Amino acid sequence: MTKVIFDTSFLMAVADRPTNWFDDISEEVGKLEPVALDCVLNELARLSSGRGKRSKTAAVAVEIAKGFTRLQCGAARPDEEIMSVAITVNAAVATADLELARSLMARRVTVFGLRSGRVVRL
């Protein structure tokens, strides 16, 4: 089973524009274990506490991540934590953050992103 870590940008994107993200990633890796880091969930909870479309999208993202495996974060920024955990547990990462994706790919981490409403391996 392949662990796939989901970042805030990816969860917000699929909450805003629903896709078959789970099926798309499963086609690539087979059976997957979706993972959310505590720092990502905390960021989503903070975003969802406001008003407006963005906070509603964040609330949907929190719901999407409820069934995910949760892993602890250290004291670094969420992107750094995602990178560290991905390397440590040999996990793929799903992100809509191009800068994070480039950093992960430079470290030979499998990265999934969104293109034209579909999840693709970058």
Image (cartoon, rainbow, N blue to C red):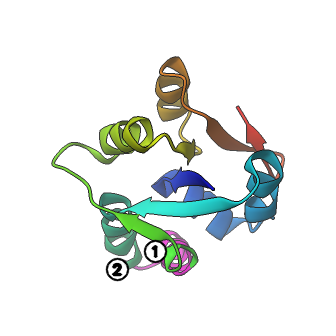
> Residue at horizontal 56%, vertical 24%?
105
> Residue at horizontal 53%, vertical 24%?
102
Give the position of the C terminus as an image quadrant: top right
Nearer-N-terminus badge (1/2) = 2
Asked whether disc 1 touches disc 2, contact meaning CB atoms under 8 Å apart, the reply is yes
Q: In which quarter of the image is residue 44?
A: bottom left
Q: Residue furthest top?
A: 106
On the image, the x and y values in percent for residue 2 come to 61, 51
For mark 2, give the secondary structure. Answer: loop
Q: Is residue 42 magenta?
A: no
Q: Which mark is residue 49?
A: 2
Which residue is tagged 1? 55
On the image, the x and y values in percent for residue 60 come to 56, 78
| Residue interval drawn in magenta | 50-63
Q: How crowded is mark 1: few (under 14 residues within 10 Å), some or many (20 or more)?
A: some
Q: Is residue 55 magenta?
A: yes
Q: Which of the two residues, 102 or 53, is positioned nearer the viewer here?
A: 102
On the image, the x and y values in percent for residue 58 come to 49, 71
On the image, the x and y values in percent for residue 11 come to 56, 62
Side of 40 relative to 52 (left or right):
left
Q: Label 2 sits on what residue type?
A: Ser
- Give the answer, above or below, for where 27 lies relative to 110: below
Q: Is the magenta stretch mostly helix, strand or loop?
A: helix
Q: Label 1 sits on what residue type?
A: Ser
- Give the answer, above or below, for where 100 lies relative to 65: above
